[in-house]
Structure formats: C-alpha cells, structure tokens
Amino acid sequence: MSHATEGGGKPRGGATTQRLPAETKRVFALVGNPNSGKTTLFNALTGLRQKVGNFPGVTVERKEGTCISQHGQELSIIDLPGAYSLSAQSPDEEVLRDVLLGRRAEMPQPDVVVCVIDASNPQRNLYLASQVLELGLPVIVVLNMTDVAEARDMKIDAAALSRALGVPVVPTCAVTRRGLAELRIAMSRSDLPVSHHKVDLPEDVAQLVEQYAGGVGHAALYLPEEKDAIERAAPGWEDRLITARYEAIHRICEDAIQAQRLARAGLADRWDAFLLHPIGGWVGLFGILGVVFAFIFSVATVPMGWIEAAFAWAGGAVEAAMPEGDLRDLITGGILAGVEGVVIFLPQILTMFFFLGLMESTGYMSRVAFIMDRLMSKVGLSGKSTVPLLSSYACAIPGVMAARTIGDPKGRLITILVAPFTSCTARLPVYFLILGVLVPGDEVPLPTKVLALVGLYALGTFGVFVFAALFNKLLKRQKSAPPIMELPGYKAPSWKAILIQMWDRAKQFLVRAGTVILGMSIILWALQTYPKSDSDDPAVQAEQSFAGQLGHAIEPVIEPLGYDWKMGVGLVASFAAREVFASSMAIAYGVDEEDEDAEAKLRDKLRAAERDDGSPVFTTLTCLSLLVFFVFALQCLSTVAVVRRETGSWRWALFQLAYMTGFAYLAALAVYQGGRALGYT
Amino acid sequence: MNACAIDTEVANLAELRKGETAVILRFASDDSAFLRFREMGLLPGTEVTFVRRAPLGDPMKFEVRGALLSIRKADAAQIEVERR
C-alpha cells in the first residue's frame, strides 16, 4: 500500500502550524500540476536567489527562493513538488500535502498559496486548485502558459474566474515574463482573501468528516487513516467528492472560458505522429540516445583530459615544492587523487544532466517512458525507469539520481538497485586492459573490440532485467496503482531551468558523494602506504602494505576465480572506483605510470606474469572471469554514497553492494570453474 | 444492425479504434486503484478519444479534457465506454 510509506512519527494535526511573527518573511508556497510551468515561474520570480536541499527523511527536493515585493520586502517562496492531487500517491505528493496542511515540523504552514494552472488545460489543473482553495488558506491563482492557450484559440476571462473563485487570478506567461509584475503586486497585498469556493460535500460525508476528523478538520479528506475510517462508514465517498469537484469546475469553466472547441492537444499530437510512430519513434529515440552518448564519449572526455592534466600538474607542483615524505605522499596519493576521483566524474554527470534536463523541459522524456513502457512492464517496472537506466550506461550516479522522477516507490527502489549493472564508462579502461592482455598482438583489432564490448554490455543489461524481475517478485509489500501518465505538450526548452538543475545536481554530488569518496581515497592510500617496507621497490612495498596483506588474505577466496594476490590488491583498490584497478595493477607489477607507453608495458608484464609453478597468471579463463566480475560487481564508492543518499539509509546501499558483488563472485566462479571442468585452461 | 445500435454500442476503452471518441460509463471495478484516473478527470460522462498506441502496441494514448494521457491496455480494458 502506498500508505505504508506514511511515517508514524510525523506530527499530526495542526500542532505544528506555527505562524511566524509578522515581521519575519511571509512564506509563499508554489503549487501546481507537473508541467504547469511552475518551476519556470519560480526561476523567473527568484532569479538565482534560491537554495536547493532535501526534505528530511525523504528524497524530495526542497527549493526555496527569495523575491522582493512591491514594497521592497523580502518574500520567501517554496517551490513544492508538482502534483495532481492532495490525495497523495507518491512521496512528492505526500510532501506537498503535509506542507499545505502544516504537518511538517521543519517548515511552517505557508502564509499564502500560489496555485499555478496551465491555462491551456484548465479543467484538470483546476482540480488540484479546488482542493487547495478548500483548505481555507489565502490563495493567488496564476493562469500560466497563456500563450499556449491563445494558440489553441482559448479565451479565459481572468476576472470572471476571479469572481467565481473569490481569489485574485493573474494571467502570466513565465517564459516571456509576461504578467510577472502583476503577480508580484498581488503577492505584495497584505489583505489576500481566502476563497469562498466550496465544494458541497455530500451530506453524509460532511458529517463523517466532522466525526472522524478528530481535530484535523478538512485535512481528514487526505490523511490515510481518517480516509479509511470515512470509507468504512460511507463507501465510495471519494468518488462522489471527485465528481462534485469536477461538476463545480465545469460550471466555472462554462462562465469563464470561451474556447472555439474544447482545447485539443493538436500540435503536440502532430509531433507525436512522428516521435511515437511505430518506426519513426525508434528512429527518434535511438537518434537522440546516439547524440547523448556521442557527447558523453567524445565531448565530455575533453574536459576530463583537462582535469587529469590539472591534477597531474598540481601533483607535480606539490612534489617540487615539498620534501619527500609521508605528508607529501598523502597530499598527492591520497587527497589529490581523491579529489580528482570525484571531479573527474563531473563532465559526464553534467553532460548527462544537460540532456536529461533538455528531454524533461521539452516534453520528450515522457515520450521515452511511453515508448519503453511495455518492455519495462515485463519486469514489473514502468516506462519511467527507462531514462534512469539509460543514463547509467554513462555513469550510475546521474542514473540513480534521475530515478527520483519515478513516482512509484517500489519501482524506484528496484531501478536504483539494478542500475549499476549497466556498463558505465568507468568500466571501459578495465575492459580495455584485460582485452589487451587476452587478445594477442599489440593492438586489439577493432571488430574484436566492438564484439567484446557488445557482449559485455549485453551481459550487464541481462543483469538489469533478471534482477529487476527477481526484486519485483520479492518486494511485494506495496501494491502499486495502475499507472496513468500525462504526455505534456512539446515546449521550447527553458535553458535557465536546465542550467540551474545541472548546477544543483553537480553540487549535491560534490558535497554528498564527494566527501565519502575523498575519505575512502585517503584510507586506501594509507592501506597501500603502511606499514612501510625497507625497500625502495614499489612492487615490494605493494606486497608488504596492508593492501598487499589484504590481497594475500583474500587469496584463498579469490583463488577459485583464477586470481592471485596481486589481482586481489587490484580488486580491493577498485572497490573505491573501478578505474583504479589499472593503476594499482601497475604498482603491483612495478610499472611506472609516468612512462610514455605505460599501458603497453603493463599489458606485456601481465601477459608475462607467471605463477609459482611457471604457468601464466592471466590465462584466457582468468581474463574472462575477471571481465565477468567487473561487469557485475558494484565497485564504485560514489554509487554506494549516492544510493545511500537517495534511498535515505545505508540499508539498501549495503544490500546492493553485497548482492551485486556476491553475484559477481558466483558468476566469475562459474566461468572459471566451468571452463576448467570443460577442459580449458 | 440499425444505426441506433451502433450509436450506443457499449465497449471498453481498449477496444476503441484509432481516432474514435467514446463516453465513459463506469469502471469495471470500483477498486480505489483507479482513484487517480478519476482525479485526472476520467469520470462517467467524460469524452475520451483514442489517439494512438505506443510503437510496441501498449500503452495507449488518449485525449481527455484536452490533455494527452498514457494508459496501459489492461487498465483501459477496465473502463466501460459508450461509443459515439
């Protein structure tokens, strides 16, 4: 049940309705349907004076900004998540409901609600508005996207609507900033009226609300327990209420709206004729994905090169300026390497979020969900999981963060749990290194490379679907409602909103994931540095360090996979980040990474490596087993840190680490031992 | 068949032909699962037009009160309509 997410510890009733003293900033809550242009309006009102955080205990974005009133006073504006109803069915909608009802401890009940309505789709948008008006808070109704409405030959009489609702109605077009001054004037009024709009509750329901409300008043209509109590006494009451609301809306619209005909989603559908076409739809989808990944793999690698160069320069500068010693090593090998390990992800993350923002902002995102829904429904997910999973092929971090758009909590959790199986770009250096060892000659031929990569990507994708199906069977606690999704009209992208979101996401990643990664990087450095050996040979140091000892210690565990202790060191180190595998193997095999052809040297060393009995270490089976391990194992601290943040607890993050790595172990074991049993070496 | 019978034929939403408009009669189950459908404006008496299906045949795209909505075929089959 979606009700299960209802925390018991939340304050009930109006107890937390702490109105701030008059001299503090007035709080305006921005409320509206998804795609009503609410966020564009928020950006237009607040400019860059905004703060983004999270509501405690849930991963719902909390956006607050400041706007200056007509009288020069600062007004505080909260951009609440978009929703279709106060009868919450997702964490986003629960936050909206609880803030409006004054049930969230960390936030006072807003002084004024600014209710944004998509003027081109007034009926459905007025449904949420009428719920808000019924609450008895001062409300300003904003008729946004009037340009779209006009393009559809709809004339909305704002004055008539204002008379009918009993609150100010301001027509705006947030994109062109039309009507913003009028909105600001309305917001500066100190005498904002409370709506007289009341939906006549059916007599029996009205009585029951009184009876069961227990002091929560009108809130009883939206709180799960109270709703259940009313339902038992008057089955079907909610249906009657919905009908009553829509009837009232219908009467208002008849008076205030003149449309040539009921608004047709004509223009959007002409685009859909191609973008959702049985063939054209796929051409469009793969074309757009092709562009996105071309950017990730080519354009984003340019700033990644700069970052590497900058850190190499900084490391060199530190080495030149400081005497040799542990402190210098800590700075170059621990801190700088750790910061680099965080920052290096930024170009890809920013690129990914740029395209995600672009798809969201133009309205294409929900088309991707529409096209892919059938495929995803086979494993119990919905089309909304598509984009987070596709993003994960670039990097699991933006993928996991993008899963926020999935309303259904179970679908969202499953998506997060399986997303890192997709082969992210950080696995590529490892794949290339092992392929280089595996395939004879100086250069892996391109067809072999492509074929191998396709196979590895397919293997990861297989993991996504198998485990999504498995978790769908196992996680039975929530029954999800049948999905219904709006396909919004196509719009020109709001570049400002995209840039603000890119900046916010990047900041969240740097602060939350960055600190964990930096800390772990320093720990790993210490593991590789201490205890000190007497030898100057880095290979000897690598063996005697804690990391080397750890490698030896886990040798019995990884031996059945065909690995030796040196690979153990590489594996231990690569749990910080996969790409570290190559550099720690280089240390273990005594290859100086500063060398011009370090890659070729490392490859030759690995090929030549022998076990005690003289047999080669990197046999075909060992290489295959290693590849399979890297496909499935969750070796990325950043992902663990982000999953912890997105799921709100260590529980799922650690579960994911354990199950993915456990499965990787079993799969690699099956490859190696299966191969040996079949007579390969 | 006379014209009258065609005019008022009862079907479910998933059976509509492309471009066809129908009026909602009732939901097959009064389950609260479909509450969100009703909140999105799919009420008895509401006109619904089937616009197109997804490239893989499911879900289906409908126009309801000027908005485009995606509904899975299995769920659409739960909604009884009267063809126009």
Image (cartoon, rainbow, N blue to C red):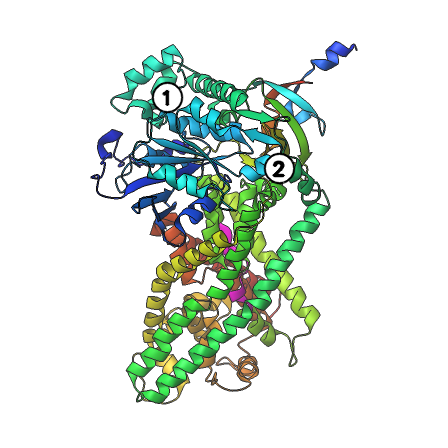
Q: Pick the residue in front: B38 or B79.
A: B38
The residue at the point 50 percent across, 79 percent down is A611
Residue sitting nearer the eye, A265 or A226: A265
The secondary structure making up most of the magenta span is helix
Using the image as rendered, state which of residue A463 and residue A517 is in the foreground.
A517
> At numbered mark 2, what does the secondary structure look like: helix, strand or loop?
helix
The stretch drawn in magenta includes residue A428: yes
The chain carrying label 2 is A
- Name the image quarter holding the C terminus of chain A: bottom right
Query: Would residue A216 appear left or right of A113 to someone viewing this image?
Result: left
Residue A434 visible (yes or no)? yes
* Residue A383 on image: x %, y %: 57, 42
In the displayed structure, does residue B11 sit left or right of residue A6? right
Q: Residue furthest right?
A: B1
Label 1 secondary element: loop
Q: Quadrant of residue A528?
A: bottom left
For the residue marked with disc 2, what is the amino acid? Answer: Ala
Please state the extent of the stretch shown in magenta in the rendering.
A417-429
Q: Residue A661, which numbered label?
A: none
Indicate whether B46 appears above or below A458: above
A54 relative position to A347: left or right: left
Residue A371 location in percent, x, y?
63, 43
Say few, some or many: other residues with alpha carbon within 10 Å of mark 1 (under 14 / 14 to 19 / 20 or more): some
Q: Label 2: how many residues lie within 10 Å, few (<14), some (14-19) or many (20+)?
A: few
Q: Which mark is residue A196?
A: 1
Picture coordinates of residue A153, whole percent (x, y) = 62, 32
Q: Residue at x 69, y 13 (%)?
A: B8
Amino acid under label 1? His
Visible in this render: residue A585?
Answer: no
Name the residue carrying label 2.
Answer: A151
Q: In the rendered image of this protein, does residue A180 appear above or below residue A244?
A: below
